[in-house]
């Protein structure tokens, strides 16, 4: 069952909502800014105007970061659910996000790699290692392909890596100071500084996902069905795993680990356009950007002028859905 009989109609509607929410994101916060002032900040920027500075130097970077990260994590989650045929699959729940964060912290603390250009690579290495470890544990477990075993393997690896990351930060005061905010999944103005280094990873991952969308639909029906349709299931699974790792790494490098985005958005997208990944993937990118913009706006507004870390809000919204899905699947 889907809301749009013709998925083509979903894209312009979601894109229009994205523009509206983006304007709300720019206009609301601890200090509301009128729409006319927002437009002036772009076409007649005045450095002496405090509202213009707020828009251009504080809210625009957060808006761009939220759009990029929301799209990346949502597409990563959609790919994981399609490849594993597991509705509970998510970069956070299957330890890719913990692995990415661990890779960045280890690279900075022990290897002395602090240049921003290396953060996506460190995150990708950590995420790939975590994904391989989860896969190995699940394969050697009884009923290794079941959603429960995969989820438990991911939870175990994620808990272990989170504990290791916390231990490193507790023993290294400089690391704790550097990554304290980042590890909470906070979208800040600093996120845009990472965009030039994360963008090639992000764009490459999204293009690969879009190019593989038709094959993901076949793979989501099972390996035997995909093989019967002429798809090399093993090769495609490996390629899509790397795509998921790249998308997760680019998102984590920008804002740190944000849980449940890759779980919530693909399920919401299926309610709109159905189960065809030719539509799920592009729509997930737009819905993910829309979702994270709304979450970041809520994080700014709920306790204004105090801000909540965006990752706290995504967890608050995603946890109930996760419980409902667990009851349906397990």
Image: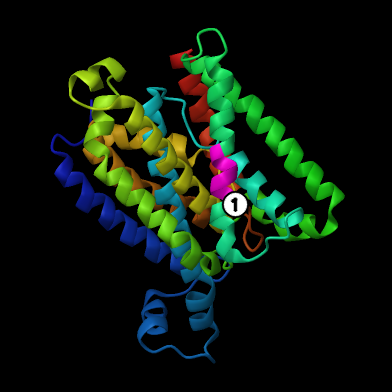
| Range of residues picked out in magenta | 123-128
Residue at 53% in and 29% down: 320
Residue 280 magenta-highlighted: no
In the rendered image, the vertical position of residue 80 relative to residue 73, given as above or below: above
Q: Colour scheme in the image?
A: rainbow
Task: Answer yes or no: is residue 322 visible.
Answer: yes
- In the image, taking residue 249 as reference, residue 112 lies left or right, namely right
Q: Main secondary structure of the magenta part?
A: helix
In the rendered image, the vertical position of residue 6 relative to residue 257, given as above or below: above
Task: Answer yes or no: is residue 301 visible.
Answer: no
Residue positioned most to the top? 142
In this orientation, which residue lies closer to the viewer: 9 or 235?
Answer: 235
Residue at 50% in and 19% down: 326
In the rendered image, the vertical position of residue 235 relative to residue 59, given as above or below: above
The image position of residue 162, as x and y in percent, is 70, 38
In this orientation, which residue lies closer to the viewer: 26 or 163?
Answer: 163
The image position of residue 189, as x and y in percent, is 57, 68
- In the image, taking residue 113 as reference, residue 247 lies left or right, namely left
In the rendered image, the vertical position of residue 308 relative to residue 139, given as above or below: below
When asked about the image quadrant of residue 109, the answer is: bottom right
Pointer 1 residue: 122
- In the image, taking residue 215 as reference, residue 182 lies left or right, namely right
Question: Where is the N terminus found, in terms of image quarters?
Answer: top left
């Amino acid at each position: 069952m889907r809301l749009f009989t013709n998925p083509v109609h979903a894209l312009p509607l979601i894109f229009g909502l994205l523009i509206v929410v983006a304007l709300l994101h720019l206009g609301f916060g601890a200090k509301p800014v009128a729409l006319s002032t927002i437009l002036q900040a772009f076409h007649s920027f005045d450095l002496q105007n405090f509202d213009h500075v707020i828009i251009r130097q504080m809210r625009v970077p957060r808006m761009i970061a939220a759009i990029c990260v929301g799209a990346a994590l949502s597409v990563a989650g959609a790919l994981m659910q399609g490849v594993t045929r597991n509705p509970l699959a998510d970069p956070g729940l299957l330890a890719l996000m913990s692995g990415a964060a661990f890779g960045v912290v280890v690279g900075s603390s022990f290897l002395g790699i602090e240049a921003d250009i290396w953060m996506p690579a460190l995150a990708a290495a950590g995420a790939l290692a975590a994904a391989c470890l989860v896969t190995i544990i699940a394969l050697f477990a009884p009923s290794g392909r079941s959603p429960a075993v995969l989820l438990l393997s991911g939870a175990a690896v994620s808990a272990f890596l989170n504990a290791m990351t916390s231990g490193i930060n507790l023993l290294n005061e400089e690391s704790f100071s550097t990554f304290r905010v980042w590890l909470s999944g906070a979208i800040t103005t600093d996120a845009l500084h990472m965009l030039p280094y994360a963008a090639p990873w992000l764009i490459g991952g999204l293009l690969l996902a879009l190019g593989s969308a038709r094959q993901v639909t076949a793979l989501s029906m099972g390996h035997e069905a995909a093989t019967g349709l002429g798809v090399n299931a093993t090769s495609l699974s490996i390629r899509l795993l790397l795509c998921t790792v790249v998308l997760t790494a680019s998102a984590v490098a920008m804002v740190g680990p944000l849980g449940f985005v890759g779980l919530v958005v693909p399920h919401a997208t299926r309610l709109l356009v159905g189960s065809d990944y030719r539509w799920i993937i592009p729509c997930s990118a737009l819905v993910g950007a829309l979702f994270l913009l709304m979450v970041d706006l809520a994080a700014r507004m709920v306790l204004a002028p105090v801000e909540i870390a965006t990752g706290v809000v995504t967890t608050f919204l995603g946890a109930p859905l996760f419980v409902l899905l667990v009851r349906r699947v397990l």
